[in-house]
């Protein structure tokens, strides 16, 4: 029963997040700061056997040109087991791979974790029926849930 409640809560959270986000962007509220959220997300990604290709600190980049930006980081990650089958459906999906997650603090100091929904990417590349898109969508939701768990 507890698992069912968790699944329903996650589904509702995803629906609410999708409604308020940019098209195709899944956005989930984080109870942690940007750095802690990013570190937790990176740890989960690595534990699941994915490769982290880069972490990009946009606020640090802005500071280099004398600008101020609230904490904003991107992590780029993935593996050929997920990406290759997606690109077999449409090679143009490669422009959206490897996968990315954005973690940022808004103007009210709330931290968010966002990522492109692979189901949206499949539609974007005209391969909505690509079976791997559903698997990747569930995997990303699982990564986010694990990273944001108490």
Image: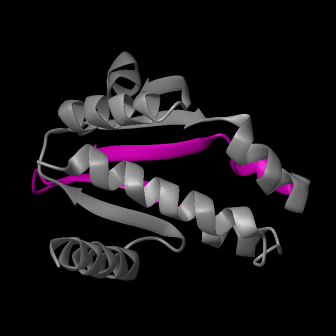
Q: Is residue 4 visible?
A: yes
- Relative placement, left or right, of 82 versus 39 is right
Name the residue located 82 percent from the left edge and 73 percent from the top edge.
127
Q: Is residue 105 visible?
A: no
**Foreground residue, 63 or 144?**
144
**Residue 145 against residue 24 in the figure, above or below:** above
Q: Which quadrant holds residue 126?
A: bottom right
User: Which residue is painted at 33% across and 78% down in the image?
Assistant: 11
- For residue 13, what is the image quadrant? bottom left
Image vertical order of residue 129 relative to residue 138, above or below: below
Q: Is residue 109 magenta?
A: yes
Q: Is residue 30 above or below residue 40?
A: below
Q: Is residue 54 left or right of residue 141?
A: right
Horizontal and vertical percent position of residue 52: 52, 26
Horizontal placement of 30 versus 92: left or right?
left
Percent from the top left, x then y, of residue 56? 45, 27
Q: Nearer the viewer, residue 4 or 29?
A: 4
- Given residues 28 and 142, the one toward you in this image is 142
Image quarter where the N terminus lies is bottom left
Q: Residue furthest top?
A: 64
Quarter residue 20 falls in: bottom left
Identify the residue at the far front of this view: 1
| Residue interval drawn in magenta | 92-116
Relative image position of residue 128 (x, y in whole percent) = 75, 77
Looking at the image, which residue is at 26% across and 54% down?
A: 112
Q: Is residue 9 magenta?
A: no
Residue 101: give x, y in percent of width and height: 45, 45
Residue name at image x 24 percent, y 78 percent: 4
């Amino acid at each position: 029963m507890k698992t069912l409640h968790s699944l329903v809560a996650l589904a509702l959270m995803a629906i609410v997040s999708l409604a308020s986000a940019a098209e195709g962007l899944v956005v989930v509220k984080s109870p942690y700061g940007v750095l802690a959220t990013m570190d937790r997300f990176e740890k989960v990604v690595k534990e699941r056997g994915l490769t982290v290709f880069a972490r990009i600190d946009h606020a640090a980049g802005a500071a280099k040109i004398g600008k101020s930006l609230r904490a904003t980081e991107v992590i780029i990650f993935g593996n050929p087991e997920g990406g290759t089958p997606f690109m077999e459906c449409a090679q143009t999906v490669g422009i959206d791979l490897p996968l990315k997650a954005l973690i940022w603090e808004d103007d009210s100091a709330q931290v968010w974790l966002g990522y492109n929904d692979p189901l949206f990417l499949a539609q974007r590349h005209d391969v909505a029926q690509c079976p791997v898109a559903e698997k990747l969508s569930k995997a990303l939701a699982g990564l986010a849930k694990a990273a944001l768990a108490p």
